[in-house]
Image: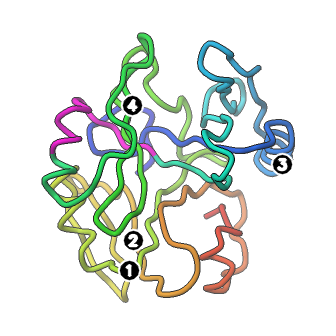
């Protein structure tokens, strides 16, 4: 369930790393009606996507030339250091150690035991997206993985998620609310992807196009 109220374990933010700020801003502006703030050089050229003047996602440069453009999905934590310890205990690894971002909050990037990166955000003055669950905003986070059977144990230990399985799909819940999903993908691209709400239901994509991240509306 999409929400703008920070709650540990729940989705809170997403950002896009891209080599072309202007092209990405134009693409998502046309697709979702987003505008974008000016890059903030104090934070490495990071900018924010806005929907009706309220923040919905981040936009930043790639950290290394060899990186490919990608979205990072962030989950809320009340204690990034504690989350790092739970990730390591569960067989995951730390890619970016917990760090404070001014008074905005704390961030870290981890990888689960299968190697899928995900971020965690500890809210400060920045409490994540300001709009969710409406057209053009966050609708869902989903993990595509070749090892779906191991995902519930890891994310359950780190985030307190419960899992409901049906027809090879795992729905993660927290206190009865749906927070994310997990599907089996033995071919194509795996990892976490954000889905954005669309006013119309798109045609069901093929496994190939979905795995490539070609569809980002649900």
Query: Residue 182 shows which numbered tag?
Result: 2
- Mark 2 or mark 4: which is in front? 4
- Mark 3 or mark 1: which is in front? 3
> Considering only order in the chain, which callout, 4 or 2, is on the residue closer to the N terminus?
4
Would you say 58 lies left or right of 125 here? right
Residue that numbered label 4 is attached to: 107
Residue that numbered label 3 is attached to: 27
Q: Secondary structure at mark 2?
A: strand
Q: Is residue 91 above or below residue 88?
A: below
Residues at marks 1 and 4, CA–CA distance in whole angstroms = 29 Å
In this view, the residue in front, 23 or 210, is 23
In the rendered view of the protein, which quadrant contains the C terminus? Answer: bottom right
Residue at 76%, 43% (x, y): give it.
19
Q: Is residue 29 above or below residue 146?
A: above
Residue that numbered label 1 is attached to: 169
Q: Which residues are magenta?
A: 74-85
Residues at marks 3 and 4, CA–CA distance in whole angstroms = 27 Å
Q: Secondary structure at mark 3?
A: helix
Residue at 62%, 44% (x, y): give it.
137
Q: Secondary structure at mark 1?
A: strand
Mark 2, residues whose alpha carbon is within 10 Å: few (<14), some, or many (≥20)?
many
Residues at marks 3 and 2, CA–CA distance in whole angstroms = 27 Å
> Considering only order in the chain, which callout, 1 or 3, is on the residue closer to the N terminus?
3
Query: Residue 111 shows which numbered tag?
Result: none
Q: Is residue 15 above or below residue 210?
A: above
Mark 3, residues whose alpha carbon is within 10 Å: few (<14), some, or many (≥20)?
few
Pointer 1 and pointer 2: residues touching (CB < 8 Å)?
yes
> Considering only order in the chain, which callout, 4 or 3, is on the residue closer to the N terminus?
3
Residues at marks 2 and 4, CA–CA distance in whole angstroms = 23 Å
Q: Is residue 177 above or below residue 12?
A: below
Residue 22, position as x, y percentages in the image: 85, 37
Would you say 97 lies left or right of 56 here? left
């Amino acid at each position: 369930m999409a929400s703008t109220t920070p709650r540990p374990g729940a989705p809170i933010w997403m950002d896009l790393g891209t080599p072309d700020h202007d092209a990405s801003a134009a693409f998502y502006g046309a697709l979702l009606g987003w505008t974008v703030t000016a890059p903030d050089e104090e934070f490495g050229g990071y900018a924010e996507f806005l929907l009706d003047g309220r923040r919905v996602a981040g936009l930043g440069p790639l950290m290394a030339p060899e990186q490919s453009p990608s979205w990072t999905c962030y989950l809320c934590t009340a204690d990034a250091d504690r989350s790092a310890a739970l990730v390591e205990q569960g067989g995951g690894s730390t890619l970016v150690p917990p760090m404070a971002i001014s008074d905005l909050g704390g961030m870290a990037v981890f990888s689960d035991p299968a190697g899928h990166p995900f971020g965690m955000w500890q809210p400060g003055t920045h409490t994540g997206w300001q709009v969710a669950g409406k057209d053009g905003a966050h609708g869902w986070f989903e993990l595509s993985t070749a090892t779906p059977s191991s995902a519930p144990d890891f994310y359950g230990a780190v985030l307190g998620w419960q899992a409901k399985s049906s027809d090879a799909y795992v729905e993660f819940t927290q206190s009865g609310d749906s927070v994310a999903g997990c599907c089996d993908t033995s071919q194509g691209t795996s990892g976490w992807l954000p889905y954005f709400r669309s006013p119309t239901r798109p045609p069901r994509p093929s496994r190939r196009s979905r795995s490539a991240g070609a569809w980002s509306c649900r």
